[in-house]
């Protein structure tokens, strides 16, 4: 993918700022010390997921490089809870950073966690729970991944959308449209998670994709409760991300999502869950009193920026890091320089969506 014009200009500005010493000056400034950088990660590839979705996945080597940059630039990597508390008290150390992972996918246990342990940095995983117990590929993302792998094929829509006719998978836009139609069909027909899981096999077969290796290697699966207990006992903080990766616009349903998710995490052995991350970064003003009612003290979005003492605690900005961010852009965020440059509009792309399960 070619970088956008804005990205090219920003990269040039960042590179010259770095060479002129502006990075280190800003990094030492009171302005940066008063701010907290919260990093958000999604997946670390087991196979080729970063080629399918570079906006959400990166390779294990790329994650190790990020942690090297954090250490090499003398950042203060704090546990999320401590970081948010110290932000409120105006007591942050220089270049403070908190690291978060969304969804709690299996690749966290086998790809991210070994690197995190090697560097000894604290992390929080915002864990969605439905697909942890029902441990199959998460339907919506698996559907998109299978269509990407089978992009050279044409697909008869009838078994998947209820409408006969060939579906074109040759471009990302067309695959996204096919994916949306399949998801909408599943929703309309009230298909269960089990039925959708069977449909994945049929979809893979129809586009000539070997789904057995995806199932065997647990690509796009979540961590099981046993795996979650293991990473939690190694010091990983598990926090709220809703049970079914959705934020209903109805108070009772919204609170039930938090309660089910919290009960699941308590069973894993996480006694205190009062931090939350909006699934897919989607939020609404209506959620704020509901989160407060549920005892949530802090919540993160996917809106880019550094958090300040005046940021609303239930709408903390966060940098979603992925293969699409270059080293100098990443370092620009560590030092705070990127915060003063124009940002691209927020993209609330759906990560793991486990909705309409029943
Ligand atoms: Zn998520």
Image: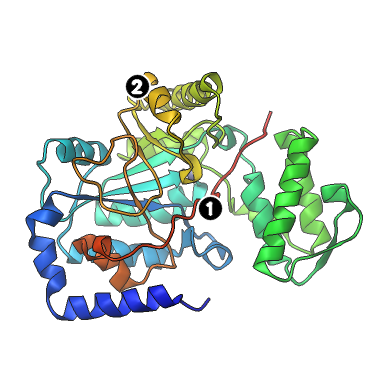
Decide which of 281, 263 is in the foreground and name it: 281
The residue drawn where x is 52% and y is 33% is: 247
The residue drawn where x is 50% and y is 36% is: 128
Queried on whether the Cβ of the residue with tag 2 lies below 8 angstroms from ligand 1, the answer reads: no
Q: Position of residue 38 (x, y in %)?
A: 29, 49
- Badge 2 vs badge 1, beta-carbon distance below 8 Å: no
Distance, label 2 to label 1, CA atoms, is 27 Å
Going by the image, does 31 lie left or right of 339?
A: left
Q: Is residue 146 visible?
A: no
Category of crowding for the residue at label 1, using alpha-carbon neighbours closer than 10 angstroms: few (below 14), some (14–19), many (at least 20): few
Decide which of 118, 71 is in the foreground and name it: 71
Q: Which residue is mark 1?
A: 349
Circle on res. 244: none
Question: Residue 237, located in which quarter of the rendered image?
Answer: top left
The residue drawn where x is 73% and y is 68% is: 151
Q: Position of residue 112 (x, y in %)?
A: 40, 54
Category of crowding for the residue at label 2, using alpha-carbon neighbours closer than 10 angstroms: few (below 14), some (14–19), many (at least 20): few
Q: Position of residue 58 (x, y in %)?
A: 45, 63
Q: Which residue is mark 2?
A: 295
Of pointers 2 and 1, the one earlier in the residue sequence? 2
Q: Determine whether 302 is above or below 356 in the image.
A: below
Question: Residue 173, located in which quarter of the rendered image?
Answer: bottom right
* Element type where label 1 sits in the image: loop
Q: Is residue 109 visible?
A: yes
């Amino acid at each position: 993918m070619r970088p956008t014009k804005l990205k090219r200009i920003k990269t040039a500005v960042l590179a010259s700022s770095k060479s002129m010493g502006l990075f280190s000056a800003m990094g030492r400034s009171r302005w940066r010390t008063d701010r907290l950088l919260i990093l958000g990660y999604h997946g670390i590839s087991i196979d080729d997921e970063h080629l399918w979705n570079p906006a959400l996945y990166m390779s294990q080597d790329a994650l190790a490089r990020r942690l090297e940059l954090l250490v090499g630039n003398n950042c203060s990597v704090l546990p999320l809870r401590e970081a948010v508390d110290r932000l409120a008290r105006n007591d942050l150390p220089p270049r403070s950073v908190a690291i978060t992972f969304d969804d709690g996918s299996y690749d966290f246990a086998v790809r991210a966690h070994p690197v995190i342990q090697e560097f000894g940095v604290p992390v929080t995983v915002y864990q969605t729970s439905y697909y942890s117990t029902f441990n199959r590929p998460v339907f919506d993302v698996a559907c998109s991944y299978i269509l990407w792998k089978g992009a050279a094929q044409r697909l008869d829509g009838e078994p998947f959308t209820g409408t006969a006719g060939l579906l074109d998978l040759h471009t990302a836009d067309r695959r996204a449209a096919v994916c949306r139609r399949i998801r909408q069909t599943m929703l309309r027909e009230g298909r269960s998670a089990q039925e959708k899981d069977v449909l994945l096999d049929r979809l893979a077969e129809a586009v000539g994709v070997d789904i057995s290796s995806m199932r065997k290697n647990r690509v796009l699966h979540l961590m099981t409760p046993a795996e979650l207990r293991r990473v939690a006992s190694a010091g990983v903080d598990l926090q709220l991300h809703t049970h079914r990766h959705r934020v209903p616009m109805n108070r009772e349903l919204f609170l039930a999502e938090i309660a089910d998710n919290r009960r699941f995490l308590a069973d894993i052995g996480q006694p205190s869950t009062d931090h939350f991350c909006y699934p897919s970064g989607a939020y609404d003003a209506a959620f704020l009193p509901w989160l407060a009612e549920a005892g949530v003290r802090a919540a993160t979005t996917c809106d880019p920026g550094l958090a300040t003492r005046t940021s609303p605690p239930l709408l903390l900005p966060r940098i979603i890091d992925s293969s699409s961010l270059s080293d100098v852009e990443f370092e620009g965020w560590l030092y705070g320089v990127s915060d003063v440059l124009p940002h691209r509009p927020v993209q609330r792309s759906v990560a793991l969506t486990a909705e309409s399960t029943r």
